[in-house]
Structures are given as structure tokens and as C-alpha cells.
Image: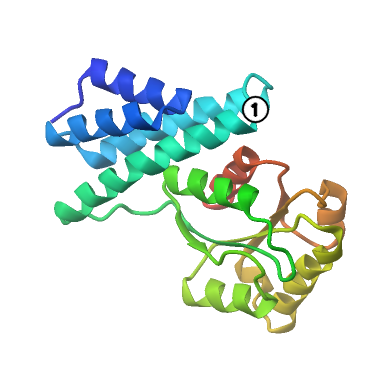
Amino acid sequence: MTISEELKTRLSNALIDGDAEIAEAAAVEALDGGADPLALINDVMIPALTVVGNQFQNGEVFLPELMLAGDAAQQVSKHVEAAIAAQGKTSEPKGVVVIGTVQGDIHDIGKNIVVTMLKAHGFRVVDLGRNVASSSFLTAAIENNAGVVAMSSLMTTTRPMIENTINLFGEVGERAKYKMIVGGGCVTEDWASTIGADGYSADAVGAVELCKQFSQ
């Protein structure tokens, strides 16, 4: 069944406004009414989060609003994924992203926002968490047939671990297989280019765009 325009608008607005309660209720109503869960992802969730992302990049909303939108999307995703599983369908991921905060660094708020946004945009995300060793990034990338490896560092003292990880991939002959992107409070675009990263983003929206670009 096709989702009604009224329900589509209600869900979309709730996601944009970061109202998890209304978004979840609207998603449940739509799914109970027979809406295609894959259509909810492609026709409502992704466009709504793209709006929020554009607003964030244009300075119209800020990090708290972006986080609320991500939380709302996470609530909706639980029901959508359950509906997909119940129908026996498979949602073909846009790509596989391995992500983590590098070894020695325990900051993960920004990384968690990126994870939520990537999932909402249809990626399969392998979240390694924080304090992740270079070898763990390598193992996860190989085992999950990832396309993108994303690393975050918030502290200047841990920034060298990003370079160490990129170098490790090269040392074992795996570097060319993956797009390696970086971000975090202590990382700059110039430094990322210097160490041979494939991409840099200062925020979650840009990170999603990089992953979409590299997964085409």
C-alpha cells in the first residue's frame, strides 16, 4: 500500500523537527496500514534527513537539532527494519562502512551521529566503537567487505593513529581496496590530504555525502 500524503508529511516533518515520539507513531501507523517499509526509507526518511543535513550545513540548524533528527530516525528505523525482516525482504545496502574512534581516544558523540545518519541513508555500518586499534579497522574492513573505512580523532595526541592505520593498510597490500575518510575535532582537511586519506569531513552530513560519493 502506498503511504498517504498526509502521513508522509507528518513523518517527514517529525524527522526534520527531531520529534522522535511523533515520528515513531507515524511510522508505526504507516506500517500497520500496509506501507512498504523500503518506500518509507527511500521516499520519506532519506529526503527528510537530507533536508536537515542541508539546514545544518547552511547554518539554519545546529548540532543539537541534527542529533535530535538522528535520534528520531533511529526510532523509526527500528520499526522499518523489523517490518522488512517480517516480510522476508532484503534491503540492499548502499554500501558497507567500517567506522570507529581511533586507539587512545574515547570520544564518540560525533562518531555516533555519523553512524545514525549513515544507517538512515541506507548504509550497513560496522561500528567498532572507540579506542579502536589499527589492526581492528583492517580486520573489520576485510571481514565485512567494506567500501569505506571512517576514522575519528578528537584529541591531537591520538591523531597519529589515523596515519598509522592508513599506513597499515598499505603495508599489507590492502590500501587500494578501500576509501579511507577521516574527521574529528583535531583533524583538518590539509592534514588529511597530507597523510593520504581519500576524504575529510568536518561534520556528519559531509561524512554521509562522502560515503554516498564513494559508493556510487
Element assignment for label 1: loop
Residue name at image x 40 percent, y 20 percent: 13
Task: Tell me residue 45's x, y (percent).
Answer: 38, 33
Amino acid beneath label 1: Phe
Q: In the picture, residue 73 is in which quadrant?
A: top left
Q: Is residue 100 above or below residue 114?
A: below
Scheme by which the image is coloured: rainbow
Q: Would residue 113 be found to the left or right of residue 200 on screen?
A: left
Residue name at image x 57 percent, y 64 percent: 129
Task: Tell me residue 37's x, y (percent).
Answer: 24, 40
Task: Tell me residue 70's x, y (percent).
Answer: 49, 38
Task: Tell me residue 204's x, y (percent).
Answer: 62, 42
Q: Would residue 119 be found to the left or right of residue 25 on screen?
A: right
Q: Which residue is mark 1?
A: 62
Badge 1 density bin: few <14, some 14–19, many ≥20, Cα 10 Å: some
Q: Is residue 183 above or below residue 101?
A: above
| Of the pair 179 and 32, the residue shown nearer to us | 32
Q: In the picture, residue 134 is in which quadrant?
A: bottom right
Residue most extreme to the bottom = 172
